[in-house]
Image (tube, rainbow, N blue to C red):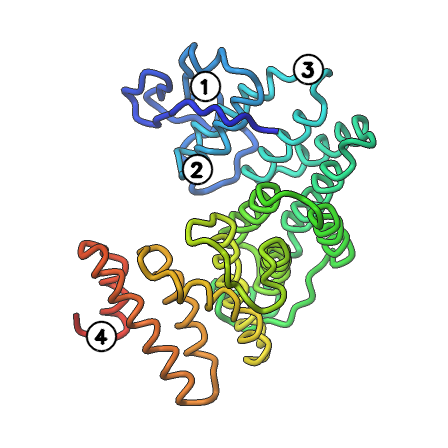
Amino acid sequence: MSSNKRVAVSDETNSKRVRRTPVAAHADDCQDTECTGCAAGAIVLDQEVLDLSANQLVAMAEQEASEGTDRAVVTKLYEAALEKFDGKNQLPHAWALLSFAEYIDFDEYAIQAVAIADKSVNDDNQTQVLLLKGRANVLKVCLNQSNWADLDNADTDDEDEPTEQKVAGDKLLLQGFDEITRSLQNANSQMVLNTVTAFLARYDKRPLISSLRMQIMDTAMSIAYMTLQWDTGSSEGTPEDSDLALAACKSTLYWALAASACLVSEGEIEDRVRPAVQYLARHTNNADVCKLYAQIMLVLSGLLSDDDAALEAFDSAENALKQVLKINPSDSDARSQLEDLGISI
């Protein structure tokens, strides 16, 4: 779907390729309170960028989104890409629409993406169409207002509050997960990584209640484990620089947080996170890996009923955070977290 070619885009006002007008504008349907400008008129793309193909613009938009580039820049890149698609590139067009829909939480684009994909399905692209439809179904459930809050705790924003609320749209959610899992059973690792990454972005959508978040992360973790062959309980042999392994570990952390809030048993959580913990414990030369390992161990330390096991998990988290400071003494996040834990440095 996406080209490997990437052209750097900066969101600074003096960029040669992208310029912001003095006042950031908003699209009429924008409901994002944190949006700093999403309307097309707020961003000006350089001609060099506008001359790129539709697929190259989509690849650039996805890359910039993953790097946290200004929302208005990413939106403008997607819009420029969508204007270039024609009837000859139906499936890439459908993927671009879905990618944009997932980025801005707009289900109308997802519906359009599915309609276009259905028209283009053939023997060669059935797996891609199935994956697209699965992700679109998950997005629809995520955007259903009845899933956006715990009705039993409507007056609180504390996501740590346990909830047993049944997620509305369970049937559609399970259908989406089934479509995704089936489509990725024999897929290459890049397709799996793209899907897990999309789910990781979904984790950061605060309105999602813990039970919905847990189901999303469970699927992300399961398909990553399956591709990495961690579903056997072992992560041995996975290289240190594996992007998919890190994505699997992130989904493991987010699943564990949601599972703990939903009162999943400590034994089940321990079993599910073990392959990720084993992988992270073997690769301690990377600060990001150490921080991720520390976060998972802190979750375990808070839920294990055996005092010795809980203390061991806490000590592992402490050592991992100290290792971060050995690698990068100026890492303020690790230093701050150690201080919050009452650990002198």
> In terms of secondary structure, where does tag 2 sit?
loop
* Residue 52 or residue 283, whichever sits in front: 283
Disc number lying in front (3 or 2): 3
Mark 3 and mark 4 lie on one chain; the one further toward the N terminus is: 3
Q: Say what amino acid the circle numbered 2 marks.
A: Cys
Residue ID for mark 3: 86
- First in residue order: circle 4 vs circle 1: 1
In the drawing, what numbered circle is on residue 41?
1
Can residue 191 be seen?
A: yes
Residue 228 relative to residue 17: left or right: right
Up/down of 340 relative to 209, above or below: below
| Type of the residue with mark 3 | Asp
Q: Earlier in the sequence, mark 3 or mark 1?
A: 1
| Most distant residue in the bottom direction | 307
Instruction: Give the alpha-carbon distance from disc 3 to disc 1, as whole Å.
Output: 23 Å
Please, what secondary structure does the residue beneath circle 1 have?
Answer: helix
Residue type at mark 4?
A: Ile
Residue plotted at (35% across, 24% down)? 23
Q: Tell me whether the residue at label 3 lies in contact with that at label 4, contact meaning CB atoms closer than 8 angstroms.
A: no
